[in-house]
Image (spheres, rainbow, N blue to C red):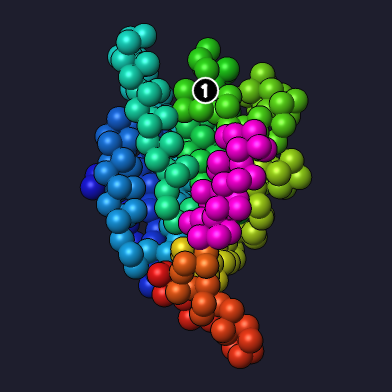
Amino acid sequence: METLRIERYGQVYVLLLNRPDKLNTINLLMLEELSKALQELSSLDELRVLVIRGNGRAFCAGADVSEFIKLTPSTALNFSRKGKEVLKYLAHFPRPTLAAINGYALGGGLELALNCDLRFASSAALLGLPEINLGIFPGFGGTVKLPKIIGKAKALEMMYTGDRISAEEALRVGLVNRVIPSEKFDEEVMTFANRLALKSPAILKLLKTAVISSLDSPEEVGSPIESLAWALTFTTDDQKEGIKAFLEKREPKFSGK
């Protein structure tokens, strides 16, 4: 792949955005390679946690503006639709996903991070949706996702002004889960990911499905889904192992079955 690299660390896989000379900006080739990579990774039983991060000093600084010159309204619409298709797949990826925001997360880069389950930021990270400063509009779902995470008023402020916010401000408004000192960032991200990889993958998948369903549906729909998911856990080997390990006062060894 030209724009991505996949690295494996035991049961944790890292999907590296790999255009460091372009601050890992998104072009059509990257979208196509992201689509293919996510589909391939989703089929790997040995993958327990997926970390997405950028190579170099940026997570992802958005779409590649140099390619905008040749866009027409029609091709711009297709680019937006392709981006949303890829990010929807990421949002429903069957394993936990963690955006390791090691630097700039702007525009489409922030929208990519918004579709991960968790977002950890280095203390040097800057986040924003600066499209208004280019005379354009968020194209990968930012107007939908961001208000759900940080609320309407703060989301509109970020989009109206196009201002970047610091990692600490992002933590304060609930945009990221944690802020980690830059010098410890990679180590602490992997420590957390490895900790998550020890959990039951079957239960993690059910949790993710239930939460996504509850956010996309009224309570009268989401609540029954939660009850069904709860009941389904009792069909798994992991449930039996978890209860047995608790009663035997030992750490469980989950198989994912």
Q: Which residue is found at the position 34% from the left and 53% from the top? A: 42
- For this rendering, which residue is in front, 66 or 52? 52
- Residue 19 x, y percent position in the rendering: 35, 43
Q: Is residue 257 above or below residue 109?
A: below
Q: Position of residue 38 (x, y in %)?
A: 33, 48
Main secondary structure type of the part rendered in magenta: helix
Residue 194, visible in the rendered structure: no
Q: Is residue 89 left or right of residue 193?
A: left
**Residue farthest to the top?**
73
Please identify the quadrant where the C terminus is shown: bottom left
Residue 84 image point, x, y percent: 42, 30
The residue singled out by tag 1 in the image is: 138
Q: Along the line of sight, which residue is nearer the eye, 148 or 236?
A: 236
Is residue 74 placed above or below 116 in the rendered structure?
above
How crowded is the residue under tag 1: few (<14 C-alpha within 10 Å), some, or many (20+)? some
Q: Quadrant of residue 250?
A: bottom right
At 59% across and 79% down in the image, what residue appears?
243
Q: Secondary structure at mark 1?
A: loop
Which residue occupies 36% across, 9% down? 73
Residue 11 vs residue 4, the one in the foreground: 11
- Figure label count: 1
Placement of 214 over or under 15, stated as above or below: above
- The amino acid sitting under disc 1 is Pro
Magenta segment: 204-232
